[in-house]
């Protein structure tokens, strides 16, 4: 084991002792110590679901990237494993950036971007991002001798060697495929496809998709590509994207294209992009397929531009709840994995409650919850729900029935930095009932609208004593409420 890796492994054990577990999310993966960003290597190995992540153990800010590592049997309770990768080689000395994992020949292969700098003929230094391989047993990994396995020199001439990262690898009929985010001199964002028989020798196939209109951001980070229903889905996270109507409000966005893929010719006919999430804290999602056939997505529950943590907190970064993806009615549906239901305790069901003015129910409160509120079409313009609420704090969800718009507002959730706190999105028109399912953990609220048609992911930093839930309506609305505590 390299000195750098050993140092990280010792450091995380010691430093974790200084972090009170009560401030950590109860059922979301979070930084063991220091900082985490993108999920990496989300995959199944020897019957367990593994999740790696971009990790800088030594401070709560981004720094030279390691790969942290957690494992789970049910995607709700996670066990932390020792740091998997450290930037300890010449070809990855600036960082082990995002990538994926796959089981091959009984071993676990990690495929990641090694970042380094190269001296150019004119003496200047320039960043190089190349794809690298490491083999392991689910805990300890050895980097391949022939790293890097895929370099920018294998790309068409105009493609960038500087922004060429985040390999997603999958296997299909005995061939491995690798999709990597990139850009070129002419096209600001693209994804490029390679193939291999053994994960070691790779061949460039094609540019699978690109931002030919120039409207879909610049560098397309963290691509993913998989079949779902009778379609293929391409996910990516374009940087610096302009908003369009109610879509793509996050700057660095995460979006999906559905389309038809010809796996012989490697062509992908894609439809228009759609936002994957309408909240404030969601980026760099990655998916995996479980042995039972479910396609599960997990994302970084933070954005590059916002810091939503209590002052003094020593760690930063969480993952979303794993979500099951389905393709129906021409769109992607996302819902919390079924396994969450095993942890639901103390049910409370209220039927046909009339809300007029401001109402609270004694039994409807809490901060680790699975809460569903169905709002029936009624005589009102605005309906409002406040969560993690008390005299000082609140996070508000407002439904404007006439405009069919919703808004999340976390201005008073405890943030002490000048971060974005409000976001609006358009709900599907013409429904009799609006169904809102909120999953609350200590530092987050994920809202699943209308059985997963839309998801709105938001980090909060509100003290746990703010646990009230307030309903209000400017006319008369009828609601059904179903509430469970989540106990893990
Ligand atoms: C996305 C990203 C990736 C990169 C990683 C670095 O959030 O910028 O493109 O691999 O983070 O930590």
Image: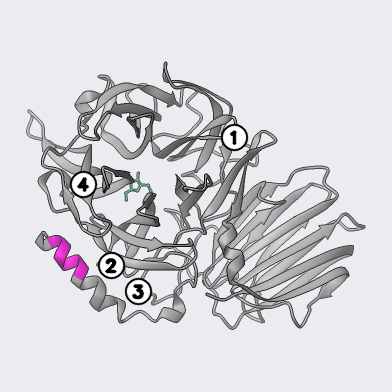
Rounded to the nearest angstrom, the CA distance separating label 2 from label 3 is 8 Å
Name the one closer to the observer, 28 or 160: 28
469 lies left or right of 459: right
Of the numbered discs 1 and 2, the one sitting upstream in the chain is 2
- Residue pictured at 42% horizontal, 20% vertical: 266
Q: Which residue is mark 3?
A: 314
Query: On residue 59, which mark appears?
Result: 2
| Residue 89, position as x, y percentages in the image | 12, 49
The relative height of residue 37 versus residue 262 in the rendered view (above or below) is below
Mark 4 and mark 3 in contact (Cβ < 8 Å)? Answer: no
Q: Which residue is mark 4?
A: 134
Residue density around tag 4, few if under 14, some if 14–19, many if 20 or more, within 10 Å: some
Q: Mark 1 against mark 2, which lies toward the viewer?
A: 1
Query: On residue 329, which mark appears?
Result: none
Residue density around tag 3, few if under 14, some if 14–19, many if 20 or more, within 10 Å: many
Quadrant for the N terminus in the image:
bottom left
Q: Which residue is mark 1?
A: 229
Of the numbered discs 3 and 4, the one sitting upstream in the chain is 4
Q: Tell me the SS state at disc 3.
A: loop
Of the numbered discs 1 and 3, the one sitting upstream in the chain is 1
Q: Is mark 2 within 8 Å of ligand 1?
A: no
Of the numbered discs 4 and 2, the one sitting upstream in the chain is 2
* Magenta span of residues: 4-9
| Residue 482, position as x, y percentages in the image | 75, 68
- Residue pictured at 88% horizontal, 64% vertical: 478
Of the numbered discs 4 and 1, the one sitting upstream in the chain is 4
């Amino acid at each position: 084991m390299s000195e750098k890796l050993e140092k990280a492994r010792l450091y995380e054990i010691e430093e974790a002792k200084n972090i009170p577990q009560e401030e950590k999310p109860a059922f979301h993966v979070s930084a063991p110590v220091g900082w985490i960003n993108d999920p990496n290597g989300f995959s199944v190995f020897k019957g367990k679901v593994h999740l790696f992540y971009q990790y800088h153990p030594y401070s709560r800010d981004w720094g030279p990237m390691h790969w942290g590592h957690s494992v789970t049997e049910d995607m709700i309770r996670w066990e932390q494993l020792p740091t998997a990768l450290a930037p300890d080689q010449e070809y990855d000395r600036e960082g082990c950036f995002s990538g994926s994992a796959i089981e091959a020949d009984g071993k676990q292969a990690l495929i990641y971007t090694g970042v380094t700098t190269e001296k150019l003929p004119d003496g200047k230094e320039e960043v190089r991002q190349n794809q690298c391989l490491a083999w392991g047993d689910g805990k300890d990994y050895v980097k391949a001798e022939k790293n890097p396995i895929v370099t920018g020199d294998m790309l068409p001439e105009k493609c960038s060697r500087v922004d060429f990262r985040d390999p997603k690898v999958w296997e299909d009929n005995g061939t491995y495929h690798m999709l990597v985010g990139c850009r070129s001199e002419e096209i600001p964002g693209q994804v490029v496809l390679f193939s291999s028989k053994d994960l070691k020798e790779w061949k460039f196939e094609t540019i699978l998709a690109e931002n030919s209109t120039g409207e879909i951001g610049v560098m397309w980070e963290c691509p993913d590509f998989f079949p779902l229903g009778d379609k293929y889905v391409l996910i990516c996270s374009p940087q610096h994207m302009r908003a369009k109507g109610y879509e793509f409000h996050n700057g660095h966005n995460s979006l999906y294209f559905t389309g038809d893929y010809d796996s012989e010719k490697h062509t992908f006919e894609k439809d228009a992009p759609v936002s994957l999430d309408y909240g404030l804290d969601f980026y760099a999602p990655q998916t995996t397929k479980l042995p039972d056939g479910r396609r599960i997505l997990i994302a970084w529950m933070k954005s590059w531009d916002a810091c939503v943590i209590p002052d003094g907190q020593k760690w930063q970064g969480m993952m979303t709840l794993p979500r099951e993806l389905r393709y129906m009615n021409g769109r992607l549906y996302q819902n919390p994995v079924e396994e969450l239901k095993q942890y639901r305790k103390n049910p409370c069901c209220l039927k046909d409650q009339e809300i007029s003015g401001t109402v609270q129910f004694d039994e409807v409160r809490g901060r680790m919850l699975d809460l569903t509120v169905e709002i029936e079409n009624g005589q009102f313009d605005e309906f409002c729900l406040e969560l993690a609420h008390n005299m000082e704090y609140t996070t508000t969800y407002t439904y404007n029935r006439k405009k069919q718009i919703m808004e999340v507002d976390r201005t008073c959730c405890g943030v002490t930095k000048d971060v974005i706190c409000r976001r609006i999105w358009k709900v599907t028109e013409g429904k009799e009932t609006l169904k809102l399912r909120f999953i609350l953990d200590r530092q987050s609220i994920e809202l699943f609208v209308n059985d997963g048609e839309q998801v709105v992911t938001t980090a909060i930093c509100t003290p746990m004593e703010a646990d009230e839930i307030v309903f209000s309506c400017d006319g008369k609305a009828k609601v059904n409420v179903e509430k469970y505590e989540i106990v893990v």
